[in-house]
Image (tube, coloured by chain):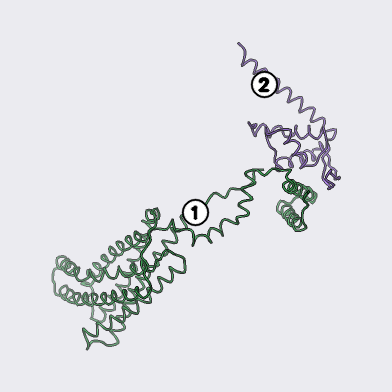
Chain colours: A green, B purple
Amino acid sequence: MLHELTPETRKQLAALCHSLLDIHGLKPDAYDELYTHLEDKILAYLNGEEAVTEKDALILAREHFGQPEPLASQWQPVATAGVQAPLRKLLAVLALGTLIVLTAKQITLLIMLKAVLAWGTPTFVRYTMTLIDLSANLVALTLLWALVKRWQRPIMENRPSSPLYMPLPVRIALMAVLLAAAAVAVRWFQNSASEINALISQSSGWSSNTLRAVLNAFPATFPSLLLSIAMPLIWLWWSDNGSRGYKRLVWIAASYAIFQLFFFYTTDIITYGISFPLNVYWFNVGMTLASMVGYQIAYAAVALVVYIMLRTTRLAHRSQSEPPLDVAQDT
Amino acid sequence: MGLDKELIGATTRILVLSALAKEPDYGYGLIKRINVVADGLFEWHEGTVYPVLHKLEKEGCLRTQWQEADSGRCRKYYYITAKGREMLTERKRSWRDLNVVVGRLGEIGHAP
């Protein structure tokens, strides 16, 4: 039985011919010839008079499959597990990077402290130090971002791993313990820092005493530094169960920031109150809050760096793996 | 083994005129007819033939007429004109001359 074109197909064919005429500014006579030619061609395919070549079959297969671009983005969240960077390696890079930049920041702060103490009042010193601290965090994050970008290619070439996933209550409990430990460590560092400040301000020589102060500060700063670095990374590790969609990663970063801000601030006030009950007044609370907000923004940003990196990794892979789109019919 | 694309391009006019001199046809029918005769030596695509047909029509070598095809549908048939026949004769003569030259060169190449 010979096929006939349906009214719907004829309508589409007419629309196609009209658009071709409009685009190329052809004479109306060309419309009829184009239309009848395409009609003949379609009918020849349907009636089996015209054989389907491999090239035709490819075009048909792709057309039936759908547009590659939107489909690739739909597949991305569910079919890219094999191309994601292993979280273990990613976190190792971030931990090392954070350790380097935060250590550099701490040294810079100690060096600057001497200069500030020489000409400032105690209140002015605290404001200045907070400002310097926040600025240093921004510098640290910029350096970290550069580091991650630099190492992006080796990381994305690795095979993925299956990260350890823990239920939310267990994560919260463990994070609470860690945060409490970090708060104590920070307070210890602050006490040590007071002694170091006194040492620097009383010293007459610049180089030798500054170096001494830095060396003295390290045993005190290291635990808090390590904990500060470890916490966002551990949070990411625990939150990652293999699915790294846009919403999930944003949720991880945001929840971490809120969670740590609340717990760190609370534990800090509590431990400060236990250590110095007479000194808990609003100025200290405000300054502590400002300082903590700065830290939390910085560490939440670390989590966001992870997200951005994963996102760029996936996009880079997609552009590499996508087959060429050259399906233009050879005429 | 297929023919060189450049050679096919250079012979499009003579092939079209030859086919239409034998029998008037519409675009799709002409393409099909020539592809059958070519028997896989080359394959014409629609985009290549229509510009040639239109150009020959513009030059007065072909004329067109809408008429009913065997399928019962109305199609634009191409007819060769007197000018077209002259052109075909001229082209055939050139083709034969060229063929002679190629043949002579072949003889020279195979001479003992």
Asked which quadrant contains residue B65, the reply is: top right
Question: Is residue B63 or residue A246 the one in the foreground?
Answer: A246
Q: At which x and y percent is residue A82?
A: 44, 56
Q: Considering the image in quadrants, where does the C terminus of chain A appear?
A: top right
Q: CA distance from mark 1 to mark 2?
A: 51 Å
Secondary structure beneath label 1: helix
What residue did someone put label 1 on?
A319
Q: Amino acid at mark 1?
A: Ser
Q: Amino acid at mark 2?
A: Val
Q: Chain of mark 2?
A: B
Q: Which residue is pictured at 40% across the width and 74% down the height?
A: A255
A50 vs A169, left or right, is right
Asked which quadrant contains residue B10, the reply is: top right
Q: At which x and y percent is residue A167?
A: 38, 72
Query: Are dots 1 and 2 on a single chain?
Result: no
Up/down of A237 relative to A261, above or below: above
What residue did someone put label 2 on?
B102
A72 vs A168, left or right, is right
Q: Confirm or deny contact between disc 1 and disc 2 (CB under 8 A).
A: no
